Amino acid sequence: MRYGFGIDLGGTTVKIAYFDETGNMLSQWEIPTVTDNNGARILPDIADAVKFYISKNNIDPASILGLGIGVPGPVNSKGVVNKCVNLGWGVFNISEELSKLTGFPVKAGNDANVAALGEFWKGGGQGCDNMVFATLGTGVGGGIVIEGQLLHGAHGAGGEIGHMVLKRDETVPCNCGKCGCVEQYCSATGIVRLAKEHLAETDESSVLRSLNPITCKDIFDAGKEEDAVALEILNEYYALLGEFLANLCCVVDPEIVVLGGGVSKAGQMLLDGVRPYFYKNVFHAASGAKFTLASLGNDAGAYGAFKLALDSFG
């Protein structure tokens, strides 16, 4: 039996998991992400944590097939990171650098793409060859699997679905600098923005008016209680999300669409809400896509990172 590590590098913490080659997670822990001095300590800290774990548990280094890592930024197929603003990183080959520090082969990918691979392998996308994964959180990220292969793209920006333009007449800029991105409407912060705009345009009574701040969960909870204003907000949200996913599926034609992130905690209510708008907008030949919820939660990145290593070095 061979083993390896899946590493999910975030702006606050680094999740590190130890797997066997069948995909069983045997151990998991976290270390802080130290971003001082343009993130100079991040990779050495990860290497030290991995080497300490191996030593502490008397693991034969020869049994380690390699490491996989997901990072919050574009990464091309050769492991070159094209700036991770939140970490202070510029352009460099993370696979080569981390390999030098650990002594093991390393495969790197974008964190959202890697999480998609995790869901494809051990989560909501199991058993499929073509999958769209959308994470609806503070922003909108995701990943695309085509014929069993994760889409990285020529510049490491494959699967940046949150920055497709959904409204051309938008005047407020997205964090990326463009206007009208999917992320501005279909994220958890996007639905709150829709709610604030709607409440400002109407005098209708709503439980949402007594809440400050309003959260994504508040809106769904109010909708469950048949609050008329909340239902109108949700209907607008479902329409935007359904149109976005329909356009995406016209390109990918997936067997399944997996929804994750904080918004997905709305569960069946979210799936039932988006389906009618998806079917209204999708090209008929791509209308067979099924919808499901992500099942790995915060572990998706670690699973996907290890799968990168397993596919490359296993």
Image (cartoon, rainbow, N blue to C red):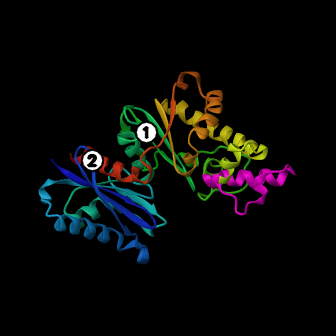
* 130, 19: nearer the viewer: 19
| Rendering quarter of residue 282 | top right
Disc 2 marks a residue whose amino acid type is Asn
Residue 167 visible, this orientation: no
Compared with 209, 240 (above or below) is above
Disc 1 marks a residue whose amino acid type is Gly
* 78, 13: nearer the viewer: 13
* Mark identifier at residue 37: none
Where residue 163 sits: x, y (%)?
Answer: 57, 49
Q: Is residue 106 magenta?
A: no
Where residue 75 sits: x, y (%)?
Answer: 40, 54
Q: Which residues are magenta?
A: 188-217
Left or right: 61, with 191 as reference point: left
Q: Secondary structure at mark 1?
A: loop
Few, some or many residues within 10 Å of mark 2 (<14, 14–19, 20+): few
Compared with 117, 63 (above or below) is below
Q: Secondary structure at mark 2?
A: loop
* 220, 189: nearer the viewer: 220
Earlier-in-chain disc, 2 versus 1: 2
Q: CA distance from mark 2 to mark 1?
A: 17 Å
* Mark identifier at residue 24: 2
**Residue bearing the label numbered 1:** 124
User: Please, which residue is most extreme toward the front here?
Assistant: 225
Few, some or many residues within 10 Å of mark 1 (<14, 14–19, 20+): many
- Helix, strand or loop: magenta stretch: helix
Where residue 222 sits: x, y (%)?
Answer: 70, 48
Q: Is residue 201 magenta?
A: yes
Left or right: 98, with 289 as reference point: left
Residue at image point 55% right, 46% down: 264
